[in-house]
Image: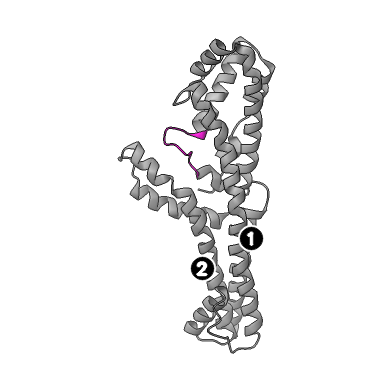
Amino acid sequence: MIVQLFVAVLGILVIARTVLSAVRTFVVPRGVNDRLTWVAFRSIRKVFDLVASPSKPYPVRDRILAYYGPIALILLPAWWLVLLAGGFGAIFWALGLSAEEAIVASGSSLLTLGFLEPDVPLGDIVAFIEAAMGLALVALLISYLPTIYSAFSRRELLVSMLEVRADTPPSPVVMITRMHRLQGLDALRPMWERWEQWFAEVEESHSSLPVLVFYRSQQASQSWVNAAGAILDGAALVRSSVSIWAARTCGRRSLRPAATSRTS
């Protein structure tokens, strides 16, 4: 009896910790580091590092690592579902099912297959709760996919436009020189303002949805991190020589909240 009670409590703790991980990752609107999410992302990253080793050419590694963010995002709910299946399986075993029957009943309830009804006290209630949690996790991922890709599109818009102004890879010297030749340095003011807004949006979206940090730019020659660095370097150059107010405010922005995310 004591063993069954201990296993049931352990299963409840696993379920509660898994739900907390999902809430921290997708629902809480701030950058919260979660250990379960970190384990999932780190494990997947190790597999990608083996396939895309540093010894391979950059174009090959870039093509492979471009799949890391999306695949990790898809496999993350699967990791949560496995933990939920184990937690509810422990509860079913504590209620009286054998180990094999507990695993089958947990998987059947979690995936809403319903081919095995747990014939134990409170078995139906536990099965209903597990089915609701499984559906909620899948619905949570589906509902957040449009949000994630919308934030990705907003991030990449100015990055793509910067290629014309700053070349590839982006250079702050090239950017300032071209803007000065075409429209004069006064034209830099609206550009600083747009990029200041871009920094604010990236800080908000990449802190609340850290998986966006691992979404690479659409072209292998482009990088949102390099683009941000070029803008900050350009703002520092202009601030030191011309002292445009907009360059000062843009230069004070940084990507530290997103860059320090420890999802992976």
Q: Quadrant of residue 9?
A: bottom right
Q: Which residue is mark 2?
A: 82
Q: What amino acid is found at the position of numbered circle 2 in the picture?
A: Val
**Residue 234 at x, y = what percent?**
56, 19
**Residue 194 at x, y = what percent?**
64, 27
Q: Is residue 51 left or right of residue 245?
A: left
> For the N terminus, which image quadrant?
bottom right
Other-residue count near label 2 (Cα within 10 Å), few / some / many at <14 / 14–19 / ≥20:
few
Q: CA distance from mark 1 to mark 2?
A: 15 Å
Q: Is residue 262 visible?
A: no
Q: Nearer the viewer, residue 161 or 124?
A: 161
The relative height of residue 73 versus residue 214 in the rendered view (above or below) is below
Q: What amino acid is found at the position of numbered circle 1 in the picture?
A: Leu
The relative height of residue 48 versus residue 250 in the rendered view (above or below) is below
Earlier residue among tags 1 and 2: 1
Q: Check residue 159 in the rendering and tell me which mark sits there, or answer none.
A: none
Region rendered in magenta: 215-224
Q: Which residue is mark 1?
A: 20
Which residue lies at the image location 66% right of the left edge and 54% below the top edge? 27
Which residue lies at the image location 55% right of the left edge and 29% below the top edge? 228
Q: Is residue 53 left or right of residue 247?
A: left
Q: Is residue 48 left or right of residue 194?
A: left
**Residue 257 at x, y = what percent?**
61, 38
